[in-house]
Image: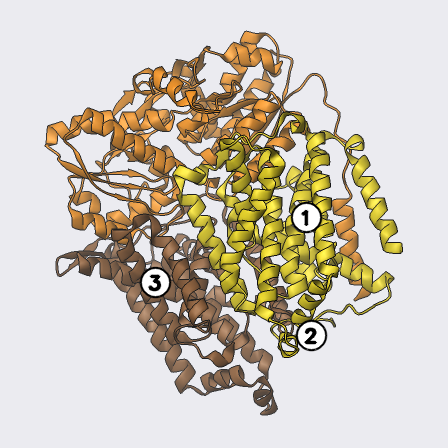
Chain colours: A brown, B orange, C yellow
Amino acid sequence: MIFAQFMSGLSRGMMLFLIASGLSLIFGVMNILNFAHAALWLVGAYLCYTFWYLMPNAALGLWLSIFLAALSLAAVGWIIEAVLIRRVYDRELSEQLLLTYALVLIIDDLIKIVWGVEDKLIARPPLVAGPVFIFGAPLDSYFIFVICVGFGVAIGLWWFLKKTRYGHIVRAAVFSREMVSALGIPIPRIYTGVFALGIFIAGLAGAIQAPVGSITLGMDMAVIIQAFCVVVIGGFGSLLGTFVASLVVGEVYAFSILIWPEGALALIFIVTALVLIVRPWGLFGTPART
Amino acid sequence: MKFKQILVVGMLVVLSGWVGADSCPAAEPYHLGVDLAVTGTGALYCKDGVDAIRLAVDEINKAGGFLGKHPIKLFVRDSHTKPDVAVREAKDLILRDKVRCILGTYSSACAVAIKPVCKEYKVLHIAAISNSENITKTHFSPYTYQVVPNSYMQAKAVVLGVAELAKKKGWKNYITIASDYEWGRSTQKNTVALLRQLAPDLKLKKEFWPRLGETQFTSYITAIMAQKPDFVIGSIASKDNVAWMKQAKAYGFFDKIPYPGSLISVSELILQKKTLTRGLIGLCRAPFFAHMDIPMMANFVKHFKSRYHRYPSDWAVMEYDAVYALKQGIDKAGGIETEKVKDALKGATIDTTRGRLFFRKIDNQLSCSSYIGVVADDPRYPFPIYHDLVEVKGPDSWRPEAEIIAARSNEK
Amino acid sequence: MKRSFWLVLVFIVALALPSVIGEFWVHVAIEILILGLFAVSFNMLFGYMGQLSFGHAAYFGVGAYATGLLLLKTPLPLPVCFFISMAAAGLAALVFGYFCVRLTGIYFAILTMAFGQLIYYIIFQWYAFTGGDNGLQGIVPPGWLLNVRHYYYFTLFIVIGALVVMWLISASPFGHTMRAIRDNAERTRFIGINVRRYMLINFVIAGMFAGLAGGLLGPFNRSIAPDLCNWQQSGIPVFMTVIGGPLAFFGPMVGAVIYTLLFALITGFTEYWPLTIGLVIILVVLYLPGGVLGLVQKKWIPLHSKKLTPGPNGGAGEEI
């Protein structure tokens, strides 16, 4: 039972990580807190549905749809950065927040116009439709896939930032925009790339969420707050922090419903508040960034 | 830049300075308001409801309108599933659009919020989707009518069925899982209380309260399965229910644990036609297929289907009945004056798609049935329906009048 | 001189309004007054202290629930209920503000939001006391206020009274200290001012007036629901302030007029209200920083000391 609870917490945590990592990446590099992240995540889920719907007979329909959804959402992210976000880099925090909040309202209504109000359901392929038993504990087989993708994204991002030339440039831009642009590297292009990458991960997360339950309007509103909390607990801009915090929040939730079912969600806000009070830069962030 | 700024300001001024005088109401047409959630959590159910209302209105208008001479003019507003917005929209409907009746509301919180507004402005209010019994039990308004089986009636229906099953199968204990909001809470509370009366041996092992809007139920599913209860009673609605059922199924939950009497409306039967576990015992409020022998229902389904190319859900059926309840009230009153219509509807017997029913005098609750059945495929429909359908009649399931009087006695 | 002329004109218009417009618009006007007061109280933090609160609706909600519960369960007269509401909201602001004022910028915004959500969940879950998500029904004002036009004048005078008090506060040495903290907290600290204490006092004042605005809402709508306190509700005063202009005292009030009228008009013929307001916000943020009043001041009133101040991010924000 403990193990089953642990696994369900792990899968919940991985879902959270997939959403929060893009948010954390964008904030860490560009210093923009993207309110619209979850709204785009939801668009990813709807896109996944559309691709899946268009390929009813393809053997790998769902898997291909997830990838296509993430890719096309990255393109959307690219456009949003180039058209809107770019204009507010030098603006006040409140204006950046408001701009992305306004985007939430617009995206949510556009979703309604494009996909209508009906819930969308994706039937899972037989491979991941039933339970598997690990040590006698039941586990939704789809979540094995989710957990793998979560680890994959975590390792991929780590590798990208630490081991590639592009990643080095991105990390350098975090510390000194001036220095990087003095070296002749175009900062705007880097920002666009990072934003698109963050949104790509959001799209991936949304598409992966799509077959879990139904896809409905307004799903993003609860998710964005939880993602904020995770990023805060882990420390703004720290990928490792976001990873650890996601798993902690997932596990805390999974176990707190056994003990204190009514308070499970309030607990996240209490933890977030405590972290902010005691250590505003989060568990793994650096104080310098405040 | 200056030009753009002036342009923006200009737009704002034009948009906001448009406070026109109230339009003068024509004497003849009947203004009918709809206050439903076109966006937000309730959009799925409400769209069906609004479509059915439009159908009913067009049918009546084809015959010249109410009493053959008062064509209906429809005003549809979006409550955003938020009580304060629902109140503002209700006021807007009453004061600007001069409606005489408001059909509504998706969430019970919205229903109880607009109830006092309708009462104050003496406008009829017919609730057809939201079903908390508090809409008619406490803070009674003579203007509010309820055409959906309320949460007590539904709980009672489930309990009657479950108590029977428990005796037959020797069940000893159970777990509840209910969405953490008014409907989930009141349904769970009523179910547990009634089960204690009817089957005192059954033991409630644990309660789970996922929040409204939960998308991932895995932690609840594993927790419940680990407890190995004899059965589980769920009170989860709408999209949460879809996510819950889908995930529980992926865990093999329904193969292991009986899950009788959860809300599976026709919306879910249609939406989850591929994934829904057959053999599940479900509860619904107004399934059209239960009454295809009644001409009014058969006609409604035929027209709904030819116009919208889909089958009507419970919500469509009930909103359709709401319009016809209003029509029969007006027919009986012989005029469209709200006071007369309100009095005519009091205790009135009306014809609905669900048969001939009546409003109970004490709380204006329609004597409509709750339906319990087994999910099964049917050659007549492209989605599963209920077989072995049990219809628990309104008068057999509603709260005794004495309890209502007692509940109202300590109101200020 | 010129300013007082405008104020008197607005006052006369406000007095004459209910006899000119239809009843629905009186309702809208009351809503404007209540939300305007809410937005002005929010701007005590945003415009005068330079901190963006994303949990201000919590204090609005505490005030609304305090008045609602008092009216339902006690025979206290309405004005007394309002005072208790302000005290309750102020107390909540004191407890949570104590922690919030230790942070700035994005951290301040998120901590206020976390606390706001906490209050929201408490109200949402505490069925025995707050009625849970059903909210409170049957909140009826005393008989002489049942008529909506009477309630309008009642609200008008309370809101004007509150605005005068807030105006006096902002014009007092305390208000100037707040602006000094906003412009440069470091330097203010060096001249021997306890910055945190000042910020906390300001936080409590803002909370109290939000509570008063909340208190006015219950008897007006006859019911309240926990949605009043969640973070989406907290976005509303932010919108209003940004549209109207955060650097002018009456900016949020102007924003409240525009926002509420837009809402009442747009929802009459389209369901796409979020899309509309989203586009308006983006246009304002991109092309009209400083809001409507900011533009008016820049264009028609010679600049005094007012300027757009650098935010916690260090961006300049003036030129576009």
Please tell me which residue lies in front, C269 or B57. C269
Distance between mark 2 and mark 3 Cα atoms: 37 Å
Residue neighbourhood size for the residue with mark 3, other residues' Cα within 10 Å, grouped as few (<14), some (14–19), many (≥20) = many
Tell me the kind of residue under disc 1. Answer: Gly
Tell me the kind of residue under disc 2. Answer: Ala
In the rendered image, which residue does mark 2 sit on?
A: C316
Q: Secondary structure at mark 1?
A: helix
Evaluate if marks 1 and 2 touch, with contact meaning CB atoms under 8 Å apart.
no
In the rendered image, which residue does mark 1 sit on?
A: C36
Q: Secondary structure at mark 3?
A: helix
Residue A73 x/y as whole percent? 49, 64
Please tell me which residue lies in front, B222 or A112. B222
Residue neighbourhood size for the residue with mark 2, other residues' Cα within 10 Å, grouped as few (<14), some (14–19), many (≥20) = few
Identity of the residue drawn at 12% across and 57% down: A136
Going from N to C along the chain, the mark reached first, 1 or 2, is: 1
Distance between mark 1 and mark 2 Cα atoms: 28 Å
Identity of the residue drawn at 81% across and 43% down: C11
Asked if one can make out residue B251 in the rendered structure from this viewpoint, the answer is no
Distance between mark 3 and mark 1 Cα atoms: 38 Å
